[in-house]
């Protein structure tokens, strides 16, 4: 059976995550429904590179699709998009070897989180608006504590599908862009709610409520405390999934432009 690599984007607000679940709307479910209509069969397999939580977005999610068809990749892309809702879009379809696996062959995943320094009329679905002043220098210094092979047992929920809470974080960066604070984390893989809890803890550091020692304690001893700081899903994007031979852009760009409030502009 031919295998196709799908690259797609979605706005996750209306969905209960990527993975198909009973009685809730999911991104994988929408694509499966579209595939059923296009190929006139239920004999196909759709596998994503990984799950995203409810409300989380994706700029470049990857999946593979096994289906018996004579349709070419570009026709498949167009026909699937014709059946998909406007907030899910197939960017590219490529025929690949049967050995390719969207999940197991991924070398790294990159997540982007957007924090807004002001209330926004247009970007509410794509940011976490925080009223408090944040010390971004302390946040940036704290971010480096997560880099390397760490045990993130304090930053996830019990998940029977996850065999280990050890994750290799390859890089983590923070940048200010207008009215936004951008946080990008690249890792071997990510476990449930991990990025959102890292961001939530960083925000508490920026508020002055947590210290570097608190983060070190969470990474050395299992704690339930980070759960209470979990950042909302609205600001989180799966930015990229990387495979062998692929490299990510070194530039950190926002998903939308939010100008700072007038009184927050730097004085000349």
Image (cartoon, helix red, strand yellow):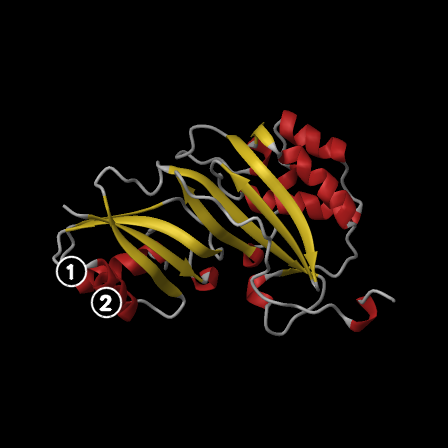
Residue at left 13%, top 57%?
41
Q: Which residue is mark 1?
A: 71
Q: Is residue 225 above or below residue 180?
A: above
**Number of numbered discs visible in the structure rendering:** 2
Q: Which residue position is annotated with label 2?
A: 79
Residue occupying the point 41% across, 46% down: 51
Assign a secondary structure to mark 2: helix
Q: Position of residue 61 (x, y in %)?
A: 40, 52
Instruction: Using a 10 Å C-alpha cutoff, classify the residue at mark 2 as few (fewer than 14 neighbours), some (14 to 19) or many (20 or more).
Output: some
Horizontally, residue 259 falls left or right of residue 133, namely left
Residue 160: x and y, percent?
41, 33
Check the image and report above or below for 232 versus 139.
Answer: below
Q: In the figure, is residue 118 to the left or right of 59?
A: right
Examine the rendered structure and indicate whether residue 82 appears above or below residue 191: below
Closer to the chain start, of discs 2 and 1, is: 1
Numbered disc 1: secondary structure: loop
Is residue 201 positioned above or below 94 on the image?
A: above
* Quarter of the image that includes the N terminus: top left
Q: Residues within 10 Å of mark 1 (few under 14, many from 20)?
A: few
Q: Is residue 109 or residue 87 the one in the foreground?
A: 109
Q: Is 213 left, or right, of 165 in this rendering?
A: right
What's the mark number on residue 141?
Answer: none
**Residue 112 placed where, x, y %?**
56, 51
What residue lies at 27% left-to-right and 53% top-to-bottom? 94
Asked whether the residues under the numbered discs 2 and 1 touch, taking CB atoms below 8 Å apart as contact, a structural biologist would say yes
Residue 219: x percent and y percent? 63, 29
Q: Do we see residue 110 in this rendering?
A: yes
Q: Residue at x 56, y 31 (%)?
A: 153
3D distance between C-alphas at marks 2 and 1: 10 Å
Instruction: Work out which residue is located at the far right of the displayed protein and give it.
Output: 268
């Amino acid at each position: 059976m031919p295998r196709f690599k799908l690259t797609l984007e979605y706005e996750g607000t209306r969905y209960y995550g990527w993975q198909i679940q009973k009685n809730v709307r999911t991104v994988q479910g929408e694509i499966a429904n579209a595939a059923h209509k296009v190929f006139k069969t239920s004999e196909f397999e759709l596998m994503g590179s990984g799950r995203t939580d409810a409300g989380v977005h994706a700029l470049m999610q990857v999946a593979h699709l096994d289906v018996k068809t004579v349709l070419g990749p570009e026709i498949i892309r167009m026909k699937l998009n014709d059946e998909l809702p406007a907030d899910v879009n197939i960017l590219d379809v490529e025929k690949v070897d049967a050995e390719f696996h969207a999940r197991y062959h991924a070398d790294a995943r990159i997540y982007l989180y957007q924090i807004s320094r002001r209330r926004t009329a247009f970007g509410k679905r794509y940011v976490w608006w925080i009223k408090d002043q944040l010390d971004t220098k302390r946040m940036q210094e704290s971010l480096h504590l997560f880099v390397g092979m760490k045990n993130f047992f304090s930053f996830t929920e019990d998940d029977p599908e996850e065999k280990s809470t050890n994750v290799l974080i390859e890089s983590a960066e923070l940048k200010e862009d207008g009215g936004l604070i951008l946080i990008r984390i690249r890792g071997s893989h990510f476990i449930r709610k991990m990025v959102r809890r890292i961001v939530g803890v960083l925000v508490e550091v920026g508020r002055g409520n947590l210290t570097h020692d608190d983060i070190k304690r969470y990474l050395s001893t299992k704690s339930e405390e980070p759960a209470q700081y979990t950042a909302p899903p609205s600001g989180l994007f799966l930015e990229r999934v990387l495979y062998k031979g692929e490299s990510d852009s070194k530039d950190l760009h926002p998903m939308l432009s939010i100008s700072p409030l007038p009184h927050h502009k730097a004085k000349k």
